[in-house]
Amino acid sequence: EPPAAEGGEAAGGGDELISVGFSQVGAESGWRAANTKSIQDTITEENGFELSFSDAQQKQENQISALRNYIAQGVDVLAFSPVVETGWDAVLEEAKAANIPVVLTDRAVETEVEDAYVSFIGSDFVKEGEMAGEWAAEEYDGEGYKVVELQGTTGSAPAIDRKEGFASAIEGTDLEIIDSQTGDFTRDGGKKVMEGFLTAHDDIDVVFAHNDDMGLGAIEAIEAAGKTPGEDIKIITIDAVKDGMQALADGKINYIVECNPLLGPDLAEVIKATVAGEPVEERIVVKDEAFDQEAAVAALPDRQY
Ligand code: AHR
């Protein structure tokens, strides 16, 4: 079969490729790497797409300028995972004025723009926080435990929602959040913030980290302080990427709520349906599980990411 022609002809079939401009948050975590791979593995020429992909390095201004470039290029569909919730109205208006449908993946936006996007595909972050909090409440209520929280990127949907979900689930228990700061979803951020927590407080019993990477950074800080992660200080995280699951299997993390990063297949379907003028679901909620040590040991051999 001849290779795909320039200008958007699909190999063999003669069908037009659907051009997609995707603006990714960054490469801040293992979760993000798996999410990027899922998108790049499914939004392919073979599947009928021409993907332009950019990494915004966790900066909203980079995302906005990437989206503006894609609008100027006249892509068929825009997709992005918004680093923070607010501040998108102008660019969403521009996409709308250019008649380019927008699909949100992973993170939500708060916008005044009507019909700003056709679909939002991603996890329920409030529920993830609740699942983490419910487990903590069940395991630790009655111990008078002090909790520190490593928040995700300030202003991002997962940081706002996971904080809210966790807090509501531990309400009425004797678990107390004594400190809460952002580690920006990175391993390094988690380590630095945890070092600060350990200096400021000598009574930390539990860490709730909004993602595995920050939890893994916290493990380094706890070990450097001469304490045993998973025992002296319990750790609860969200994501369930391989490194996190390994730490859970090793007993250094105590519980992980999953956040499924494999959004590529749903994104491909939504884009195809949108371009074909078919109805799409405005909200596609991805299902998440949760793991304790035993479940992590069982799941690890088949874990893809
Ligand atoms: O938006 C999803 C979150 O972003 C993941 O939980 C975290 O690891 C990533 O950086």
Image: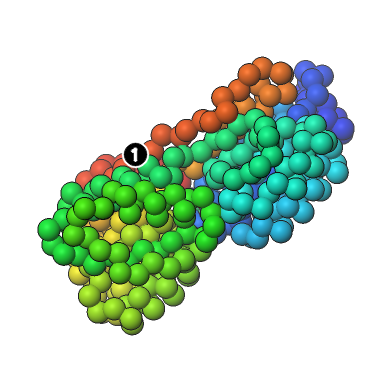
Task: Determine the residue positioned at 79% across, 20% down.
Answer: 15
Residue sticking out furthest to the bottom: 199
Q: Position of residue 69 (x, y in %)?
A: 81, 48
Residue at numbered disc 1 = 289
Task: Determine the residue positioned at 53% across, 54% down.
Answer: 156
Q: Position of residue 129 (x, y in %)?
A: 36, 49
Q: Is residue 235 left or right of residue 82?
A: left
Label 1: how many Cα within 10 Å (few below 14, some 14–19, many 20+): few
* Nearer to me, 302 or 67: 67
Q: Report if residue 249 is visible in the image.
A: no
* Nearer to me, 43 or 280: 280
Task: Determine the residue positioned at 24% across, 67% down.
Answer: 146
Task: Determine the residue positioned at 72% across, 57% down.
Answer: 62
**Which quadrant holds residue 209?**
bottom left
Please tell me whether mark 1 sits on a helix, a strand or a loop: loop
Q: Position of residue 115 (x, y in %)?
A: 67, 32
Q: Position of residue 281 (x, y in %)?
A: 56, 24
Q: Report if residue 208 is visible in the image.
A: yes
Residue sticking out furthest to the left: 142
Q: Is residue 304 left or right of residue 47?
A: left
Which amino acid, by three-letter code, is at mark 1? Answer: Glu
Counting the numbered discs, the total is: 1
